Image (spheres, rainbow, N blue to C red):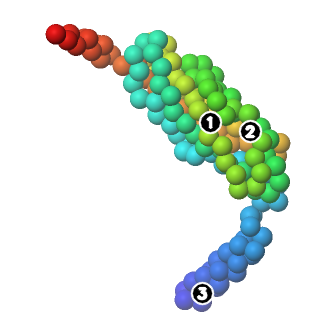
């Protein structure tokens, strides 16, 4: 058992040294999205909430692609990207409640050699609108 742990530890150290020297495991562009899930919370019917994801190229070369998502979500900005190695971009998404109790969709991030996705969710707020404050 000790021998196996020592071999595994040596492998990890050598592997880490190779990655550190090379800078990446990947020899092609590789897209990573964070966070993998995004909750917009409860939104009143026909109102909107905005939130963001980050798309990053953790591979080599240039990552070109586009983020897409079905309604009732919409890419507000950052949907098209061209990222060099180890660079990232913010993708802003807006959710407009359509009256359904819950909505869930998948945001797809395309790339020439690799794709990624993130799940976005939102729901309907049943709380009444606050009454305006009367000032004297």
Q: Which mark is residue 91?
A: 1
Distance between the alpha carbons at the discs numbered 3 and 2: 43 Å
User: Quarter of the image holding residue 80?
Assistant: top right
Which residue is rendered at x = 71% and y = 56% of the image?
86
Label 1 crowding class (10 Å Cα cut-off): few <14, some 14-19, many 20+?
many
Q: Which badge, 2 or 1, is on the more N-terminal residue?
A: 2
Q: Which badge, 3 or 1, is on the more N-terminal residue?
A: 3
Contact check, label 2 and label 1, Cβ < 8 Å: yes
Distance between the alpha carbons at the discs numbered 2 and 1: 9 Å
Task: Point out the frontmost of discs 3 and 1.
Answer: 1
Q: Position of residue 36 (x, y in %)?
A: 56, 43
Distance between the alpha carbons at the discs numbered 3 and 1: 43 Å
In this rendering, is residue 75 above or below 9?
Answer: above
Tag 3 residue: 6
Q: Single out the residue that lies furthest toward the bottom.
A: 3
User: Quarter of the image holding residue 17?
Assistant: bottom right
**Element type at marker 3?**
helix
Q: Which badge, 3 or 2, is on the more N-terminal residue?
A: 3
Which residue is rendered at x = 51% and y = 18% of the image?
96
**Element type at marker 2?**
strand
Asked if residue 110 shows in the view, the reply is: no
Q: Which mark is residue 42?
A: none
Q: Position of residue 124 (x, y in %)?
A: 40, 19
Tag 2 residue: 81
Asked if residue 135 shows in the view, the reply is: yes
Which residue is rendered at x = 71% and y = 47% of the image?
31
Contact check, label 3 and label 2, Cβ < 8 Å: no
Task: Point out the frontmost of discs 3 and 2.
Answer: 2
């Amino acid at each position: 058992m000790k021998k196996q742990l020592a071999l595994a530890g040596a492998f990890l150290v050598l592997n880490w040294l190779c990655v550190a020297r090379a800078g990446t495991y990947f020899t092609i562009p590789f897209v990573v999205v964070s966070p993998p899930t995004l909750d917009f919370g409860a939104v009143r019917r026909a109102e909107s909430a905005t939130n963001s994801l980050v798309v990053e190229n953790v591979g080599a070369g240039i990552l070109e692609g586009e983020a897409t998502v079905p309604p009732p979500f919409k890419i507000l900005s950052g949907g098209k990207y061209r990222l060099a190695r180890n660079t990232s971009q913010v993708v802003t998404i807006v959710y407009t409640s359509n009256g359904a109790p819950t909505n869930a969709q998948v945001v797809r991030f395309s790339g020439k050699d690799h794709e990624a996705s993130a799940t976005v969710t939102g729901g309907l707020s049943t709380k009444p609108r606050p009454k305006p404050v009367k000032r004297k």
